[in-house]
Image (spheres, rainbow, N blue to C red):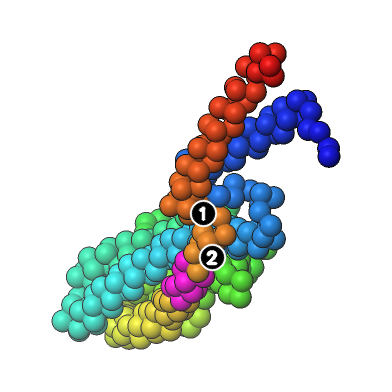
């Protein structure tokens, strides 16, 4: 028969106490934090936990990108909406001015508003977002439309013109990956979006002011003589009427086309965000099952271990208090 020594008994009791104290600490931490696994290495399903955490981190990053891209696209859409509105106003002025009852002086008065609209459209084309030119392609530190001049007149609003600079980078467009399988181009061609409208407004404004614009079609080259009245009154009227079609064409085929494209991008972002939301909820639920504490079970287990720990203390206390008299 093997005799259990006092030293072995004490060692066993101390081990039991230490084990129960560790269990109490672990369960108390789980109840306090709500997590039974604080880091993947605490669990036998570490690889699964790590996989879900990486997935949720990736989704969080994509959500931030979507928010940034949406804000940028919405900014562009607002600018294009305003551009469309002022082009409608310019067309109304042109239709009013095309009436032969308006003499050259009356037309010059209408020219002031048209040229102000032209300047405003140029400012929209040169708009910046977070310090970068929206329609400048990759050349985002330089305005895409540069102010130039006409030879005639030498001064005043009718002497100004705006030309797309076409510098290196203006035809390079940025794309952002907003989900695992979706990449969105975030900027557009400033030349294709605004040049036609700006040129149409310049032609209209100069015609109302009493100046021809060369060449007859396409981008103005900066030349054009003054009309001679009354001989050139019908020529002026014809130029005003032609500008109506140019303005409407630029609005429908350039500005509004870009708005449609932006609308499509915004809808794709919404779809991607909706799908990611589903994946995020699913991932959070799966991670919760792997990591979160079962509060009821943990509390019950903690109570049992605390009882066992107190019992271990009591037994140890009795053993330590044994004296030689206990063996007599």
Q: Is residue 219 above or below residue 290?
A: below
Magenta residues? 270-281
Element on which disc 2 rests: helix
| Quadrant in the picture for the C terminus | top right
Horizontal relation, residue 101 to residue 33: left or right: left
**Circle 2 is placed at which residue position?**
286
In terms of depth relative to the viewer, which is nearer, 248 or 175?
175
Neighbourhood count class around disc 1 (C-alpha, 10 Å): few under 14, some 14–19, many 20 upward: some
Residue positioned most to the left: 101
Q: Principal SS element in the magenta part?
A: helix
| Relative image position of residue 20 (x, y in whole percent) | 60, 37
| Relative image position of residue 208 (x, y in whole percent) | 30, 72
Q: Is residue 3 above or below residue 176?
A: above
Horizontal relation, residue 118 to residue 28: left or right: left
- Res. 30 in view: yes
| Relative image position of residue 1 (x, y in whole percent) | 83, 39
| Relative image position of residue 68 (x, y in whole percent) | 49, 59
Q: Residue at x 29, y 72 (%)?
A: 85
Horizontal relation, residue 164 to residue 54: left or right: left
How far apart marks 2 and 1 lie (CA) works out to 10 Å
Element on which disc 1 rests: loop
In terms of depth relative to the viewer, which is nearer, 276 or 323?
323
Contact, mark 2 vs mark 1 (Cβ under 8 Å)? no
**Circle 1 is placed at which residue position?**
292
Give the number of the mark in front: 2 or 1: 1
For marks 2 and 1 on the same chain, the one whose residue lies earlier in the sequence = 2
For residue 78: magenta?
no
Neighbourhood count class around disc 2 (C-alpha, 10 Å): few under 14, some 14–19, many 20 upward: some
Task: Tell me the number on the disc at residue 208.
Answer: none
Q: Residue at x 46, y 76 (%)?
A: 271
């Amino acid at each position: 028969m093997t005799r259990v020594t006092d030293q072995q008994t004490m060692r066993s009791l101390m081990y039991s106490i230490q084990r129960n104290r560790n269990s109490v600490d672990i369960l108390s931490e789980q109840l306090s934090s709500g997590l039974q696994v604080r880091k993947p290495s605490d669990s036998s399903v570490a690889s699964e936990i790590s996989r879900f955490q990486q997935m949720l981190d990736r989704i969080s990053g994509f959500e931030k990108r979507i928010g940034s891209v949406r804000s940028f696209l919405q900014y562009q859409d607002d600018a294009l909406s305003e551009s469309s509105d002022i082009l409608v106003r310019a067309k109304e002025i042109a239709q009013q001015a095309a009436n032969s009852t308006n003499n050259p002086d009356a037309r010059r008065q209408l020219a002031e508003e048209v040229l102000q609209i032209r300047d405003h459209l140029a400012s929209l084309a040169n708009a910046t977002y977070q310090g970068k030119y929206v329609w400048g392609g990759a050349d985002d530190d330089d305005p895409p439309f540069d102010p130039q001049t006409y030879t005639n007149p030498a001064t005043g609003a009718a002497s100004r013109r705006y030309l797309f600079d076409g510098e290196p980078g203006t035809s390079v467009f940025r794309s952002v990956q907003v989900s695992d399988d979706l990449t969105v181009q975030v900027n557009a061609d400033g030349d294709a979006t605004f040049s036609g409208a700006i040129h149409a407004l310049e032609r209209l404004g100069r015609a109302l002011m009493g100046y021809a614009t060369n060449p007859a079609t396409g981008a103005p080259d900066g030349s054009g003589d003054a009309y001679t009245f009354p001989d050139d009154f019908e020529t002026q009227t014809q130029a005003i009427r032609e500008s109506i079609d140019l303005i409407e064409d630029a609005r429908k085929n350039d500005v509004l086309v870009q708005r449609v494209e932006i609308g499509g991008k915004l809808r794709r972002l919404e779809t991607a965000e909706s799908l990611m939301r589903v994946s995020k909820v699913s991932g959070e639920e799966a991670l919760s099952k792997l990591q979160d504490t079962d509060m009821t079970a943990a509390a019950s287990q903690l109570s049992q271990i605390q009882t066992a720990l107190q019992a271990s203390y009591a037994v140890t206390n009795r053993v330590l208090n044994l004296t030689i008299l206990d063996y007599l």
